[in-house]
Amino acid sequence: MSVDKIENNSRRDFLRKSALAGGGLVLGFYFDPANSATKRVAKPSAISENSVFKPNAFIRIDPNGTVTLISKQPEIGQGIKTSLPMIIAEELEVNWKDVVIVQGDLDPIYGSQSAGGSRSTPTNYEEFHRLGATARTMLTQAAAAIWQVPVSELIARASAVHHSATGRKLGYGQLVEKAAVLPVPSKESVKLKDSKDYKLLGSRIGGVDNPSVVTGKPLFGIDVKLPGLLYAVYEKAPVFGSKVLSANLDKIKLLPGVRHAFVIEGGTDLKGLLPGVAIVADSTWAAFSARKQLEVVWDESLAATQSWEGFSAKAKTLSSQSGTDVLRNDGDVKVALKGASKTVEAAYSYPFISHASIEPQNCTAWYKDGAIEIWAPTQNPEAGQKVITETLGIPKDKITLHITRSGGGFGRRLIPDYIVEAAAIAQHLKTPVKLTWSREDDLRHDQYRAGGFHFLRGGLNDKGKLIAWHNHFVTFANKVVKDGKSKLEIGSGANLSGDEFPGRWVENCLLEQTPLECNIPMGPWRAPRSNVLAWVFHSFIDELAHAAGRDPLEFRLEILGDKDFIPGTGEQGIPYDVNRMKHVLQHVAEQAEWGKKKLPRGQGQGIAFHFSHRGYIAQVAEVTVSKDGKLKVDRVVVSTDIGAQIVNLSGAENQVQGSVVDGLGALIFQELNIEKGRIVQSNFGDYPMIRIADAPTQVDVHFLKTDNPVTGLGEPALPPLAPAVCNAIFAATGIRVRQLPLLRTDLSWT
């Protein structure tokens, strides 16, 4: 049978009657094994005979007119639980007030359910339009069949189908029984709405969970309660991966409320189940209290000799040597620098930092009869399921994973270490147990944004044009064992690409990378790589512009050049639309009145841009720095190009404003020190987060609609903030910031 024939058969199965005992119309997706692993086609889903909805479909319309939409991606504060259903609702022509949103559990019927990299919107946007439009088409056909009129005379509007000629109307609830038995329309016959006719998309819709959040309703993983629930803590070594030699378990078992205390051997995977001691009690308080009396002797590894001070010294030594990996080598940098009219050298560094989400890691697990049920605030439920199978031997089909709302993620909850810890504890108990990390656990056992060291040289010709760029990046890597062989693996978000700006734009460009071995777990932190690379590159570009006596905006536009499109090369292979970037850059300059204000000493503007996660973003920061070095960010102007449509204007603005504030907090405050292989900081007392007084006074957000595919926004608006602010600080004071956090630089001036 041909692939085309298989697809046609699947399409005919798209909608079928599923009205069982009161029923309704249900639409969903399933994997077609005849096609690629990522190909999804539509198929009806079942409603149980007692009409209880089972979350294995995207749309359900009940006879009473209620429309239930499944949100398949995890909600971590990015608003996806609201915005993705809005796409279906727009095409479905349903009143938003008639819609009920349900969080979908992990189920292959939905396809990928991870939330990270700003991929949720672009990977689902077109498909969700099609699903909503197909349902609308079926409902309209049902009305046409009932009234015996041509479909062309009907229009769907406000959760009903209308016949304008006679003024008749049938609500969707009245049509579901008929619609459910109609043959599926072909893809070609389903017409999507013109964007000019959108009523819902582009409007301001409050988050569907907002009322529950502000009134303290149980939504988050930490809120889960089950009959007979026990409460657990898990003590891991202060030096990552160290094994337990001994622990005073007999004493712990005698403490009030303690039910169990035992050692879990664990392994060496820094993203998996590490060795530790579990304490299980009748309450979280009892478990936490008992932990204070826990005494563990650890077999500390060689990692106990690692320190940030040592890493810094080693990086400086390596900077004078050739890089281990050459990522780009265009032209002849050595010759170009030697012949340059002016050269600039600078070293930039940034520390490890934590995700520090407000809700610490937690997970509830219940193991019984060889199967396990999980309730987790996760960004990546598939990874949680996989690690349970690989670590504990529980088959995939014996794992049920419920996705709860997350109290922040920023990439942290992509790593399932806390999920497998809870599952391992539950497997010992055969009773439901909730594992809760303390704030100290969260800071000292995170999957950190990696630190890094950049040693840069740039060359300018006699006209002040950039002709040479050299960056030696000293980064961090973990030793891992794969296929029986040990090797260094650069940390997540800690690698440099040969495609990074301005790599493809400078005739003579050398980008090289050297990994430093460490035993610190690393994971994606909001806008991985871009969150620090943008700061380094656009700060150094600013240095070069000032060294050339050039306007920083003009200098950047010159580097971008006249080509419309730069193809991808190297490892990442990401194409770059130069016109889109120039557009946002020029737009933000206009909105901020770049260069038109005569500012006194102590005030300045800084500009930066970055392309990441498919979004083109430019920002101008306006700052005031007092003579004693106190910084105030007065205004940040943001211009964004994330495609042809903003799904939820309220949510989009929130994402940009949140990125600005989050980026500023990381810039000013956040830093983790490493001593003897340990994270020194333990809580917000020594790891300060941004407060209201430090936030920008004003954030102006501009969305430039372009004829490009729709993409996400949670990541790309953050990277330009740090360089824009630091460049503004230089304009205000003449002080160049080359080390993060900003608190390490004295900004006082005379």
Image: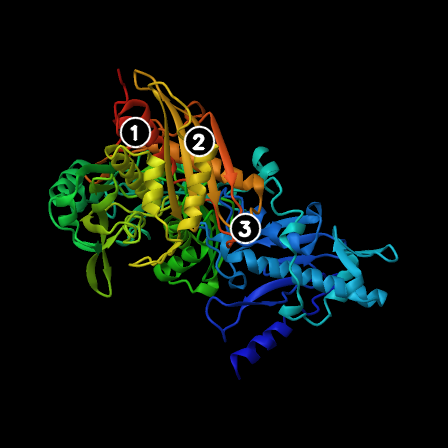
Count residues near mark 3 (Cα–Cα under 10 Å), then give few for <14, some for 14-19, many for 20+.
some
The residue at the far front in this view is 463
Let me know if residue 448 appears in the view. Answer: no
Q: Quadrant of residue 250?
A: top left
Count residues near mark 1 (Cα–Cα under 10 Å), then give few for <14, some for 14-19, many for 20+.
many
Image mark for residue 345: none
Residue closest to the eye, 275 or 477: 477
| Image position, residue 77 (x, y; %) | 50, 42
**Cα distance between the residues tagged 3 and 2:** 24 Å
- Residue under pointer 2: 636
- Residue under pointer 1: 742
The residue at the far right in this view is 166
Residue 218 left/right relative to 639: right
User: Which numbered disc flags the more N-terminal residue, 2 or 1?
Assistant: 2
- Residue under pointer 3: 644
| Image position, residue 446 (x, y; %) | 33, 43
| Image position, residue 263 (x, y; %) | 30, 48
**Cα distance between the residues tagged 2 and 1:** 17 Å
User: Which numbered disc flags the more N-terminal residue, 3 or 1?
Assistant: 3
Let me know if residue 396 appears in the view. Answer: yes
